Structures are given as structure tokens and as C-alpha cells.
Image (cartoon, rainbow, N blue to C red):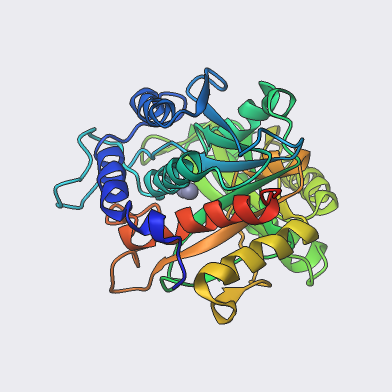
Amino acid sequence: MPVVNRIAEFQEEMTAWRRDIHAHPETAFEENRTSDFVAEKLAEWGIEVHRGMATTGVVGVLDGQKGGNGRSIGLRADLDALHIHELNEFDHRSRNEGKMHACGHDGHTTMLLGAAKYLAETRNFSGRVCFIFQPAEENEGGGRVMVEDGLFEKFPVESVYGMHNMPGTPVGKVDMKAGPAMASFDIFEITVTGKGSHAAMPQQGHDPVLAASQIVTALQGIVSRRVDPMESLVVSVTQFHAGDTWNVIPNQAVLRGTVRCFKPEVRDFVEAEIKHIAETIGGAHRATLDYRYERRYPALVNTERETEIAASIAAQIVGEQNVQANAPALMGSEDFAYMLQEKPGCYIWLGNGTEGGPGGCSVHNPHYDFNDDISVLGASYWAKLVETTMPRAN
Ligand SMILES: [Zn+2]
Ligand SMILES: [Zn+2]
């Protein structure tokens, strides 16, 4: 594969960085060691380092030869790990009990560092590249905090790009999709308050367990009966908490769950419809309802032009036949969506390997590991993206 040869020479070094980060996983807004690691490397290569955004975020700024020409591009990686007990036994397994790089953000950080090292050494582009290392991608929306902290005011890039490894997709294959590519992510909580009683005398109370059970069942009708079948939507109840013992009907039941979809109007409808269903059924059981709906990540929407650019750059590295530019969208979510709400750009999926082989284990699994064989591909993609979109003026 026509990777950048100079970057291929960094393979061993990149593997060492990646495994070092893997062994020291840190979670949302506490990525202090990882942030130091990144900042030290960038500074060592003569890249201007900005710290403190979203607590542990790092932004490196590098101008091409003959200074900037007003053009600027942002490349983004994520620093954080997950709350998972790692079950791998290799030498670079987690040293931080209960925390694990199970989503490959150690690899994402490494690939962007590899590109930064190469671009700082060669500066074979004009314009400015901003290397954005954000904290807290998992659950806590570090990408949103970066944007709120003024990321794009301080670093006014014209477009921004992201990348995620993809287990199940072979090494050397790259997927992407213009338009909505990953779903929005919301959470809801329904507290059903009835009236507790002796379990043998249910007529003396108002059973919140029965009411909540019917609410769970009725919520399934939103996808099947209330929204156009051509839309993509998930409504999942994932928690049901009630009661403490055998012979007491409790006072309260609590349901929690998540909603995933692609369109703002579907999102608005579902938020209202859950409330309507829960209140109606709760009311029939003479229970009172507390409803909390919280919007987490918006849908991730890639722009057409930048997706075409990303596809053509990926084709330079892995060959056109290995690039799927109109891949199926995913119901998973990603906080890079916040950056794409502000700037045009594209988020791609880089094959991490297939089942049974290295990199084939799914993300968020205690046996997952980022595949070091793809680091050179990812870093080469970043480097070519900069050199091609902001070519050096001769
Ligand atoms: Zn993840
Ligand atoms: Zn991830």
C-alpha cells in the first residue's frame, strides 16, 4: 500500500507510544498523563502547543513552509479510555484498575501524533494544521466542551476531520458516508410513583411495577407504529428498578433508556411521545410520573465535499477498490458530531481487522486491543490530507 514511507519508518516508535498510552488509560477530563504525553511530543517536534481547553485538551498548531496562506485544517483525535476491567494479559495491559482503552482512542492519539511528527519534519504544505486532541469522547461530550471553550474561535479552521478504528472491517479498508452517518444519542428516565402496599393486598395500593411494565411494552410501539418505517430509530429501555423484597409492592419504579435517531424532527417527536405514553399509562394506573429527557450527542453529519476529499485521500493510501464512500450509517454515536455542527468535515472508519484475527474484537469489550498494524495507514491518511488539501505553493 502506498503509505508515506517516512511514516512507515515510525511504525515501531508509534507502537511503543500506543502501548504506553494503552497501559495508562485515563477517563473523562482526567487524561492528565496522556495530555502531558501528547504535549511533550508536540513540543519536542517544534509544534506550538496550547493546553487547558476542556481541562485536558491539547491543540498543536503547525504552519507549513513559507508560513500560512490563510488556509487552515483541523485534525481531531480523542484521548480518553473507558470504565472497563481489562481482561487482556499482554504486557501493555492496563495498569489502572477498572480503566481500559477499549475503544482504540490510544491508537487514534498515536496516529495523529505520527502525522504531526512527519508534518513537523517535512512541512511540505502551505497553510496551518491544527492537531486537536480532545478529552472525554465517551459519554461526557469533551468535543462539545472544546467547542464551548472556543476551539474554533481560537483556531479558526476551514474544515475538520476525524477518524475511528473499526473492528470487523479488514485492515486496509476505509469506510465513510456523506450526510448523517452516526445517530444522535439521548437518555431518558421515567419515575413512576404509585402507592405501595402489602403484596397480598394489592387492591390497597397502586402498583408502579405493573404500570412501568406496561410503559416498557407501549414504548416499543413508537418505532413500530408511530414513526415512518423508512426512518432509523431505536428506543431502548435499559434499566428497570423497583422493589426490595418478595412481599411488598413498592411505591416507585424507575425506568431508564436511550434513544438513537438521525433527524432532529424524529428526535423532537420521540421526546414528546415517550412522555405522552408514560403519562397516559401511568394515569390509567393512578400513578404520577416524573419524566426527564436529556439530549446528549447530536447526529454526526459529514458534508458532501469533505467526504469526497476524504474518500480520494483514503484511495491514495489503500486504493480506490478498498474505499467504501457510501457505507451504511451506524446507530452508534460520537461526540465529533459537535465539531461537525460548527465546521464542514468528514469522519471516517478505518478497518481494525476481522473476527478471529488481531483487531477483530469489538470496541467496548474487555478483550479489545487497537491493531498497531493500522497506525501507519491512519497517520499516512492524515499527512496526505494536509499535503493534498493545502499543497505547497512553488
Ligand atoms: Zn467508544
Ligand atoms: Zn471511540
Query: Observer-nearest residue: 47 or 186?
Result: 47
Q: Is residue 44 left or right of residue 206?
A: left
Q: Residue at x 61, y 74 (%)?
A: 324
Residue 11 lies, in percent from the top left, at 31, 55
**Tally of numbered tags:** 0
Quarter occupied by residue 342:
top right
- Please name the residue shown 46% across and 28% down the image: 46
Based on the displayed image, in which of its 4 quarters is residue 247 positioned? top left
Answer yes or no: is residue 201 visible: no
Q: Give whichever of 170, 248 is nearer the camera.
A: 170
Residue 272 at what x, y percent from top left?
81, 44
Provide residue 268's location: percent of width, then percent of height: 82, 45
Residue 341 versus residue 231 in the image, above or below: above
Is 316 left, or right, of 107 in this rendering?
right
Q: Nearer the viewer, residue 98 or 88?
A: 88
Image position of 48 with respect to 79: above or below: above
* Position of residue 76 measured from the top left corner of the image (x, y, whole percent): 57, 42
Q: Name, please, the residue furthest toward the right.
A: 265
Q: Residue furthest bottom?
A: 321
Let me know if residue 296 appears in the view: yes
Q: Which residue is drawn at the image coordinates 29% and 42% (left, top)?
A: 17
Q: Is residue 218 left or right of residue 367?
A: right
Quadrant of the image containing the N terminus: bottom left
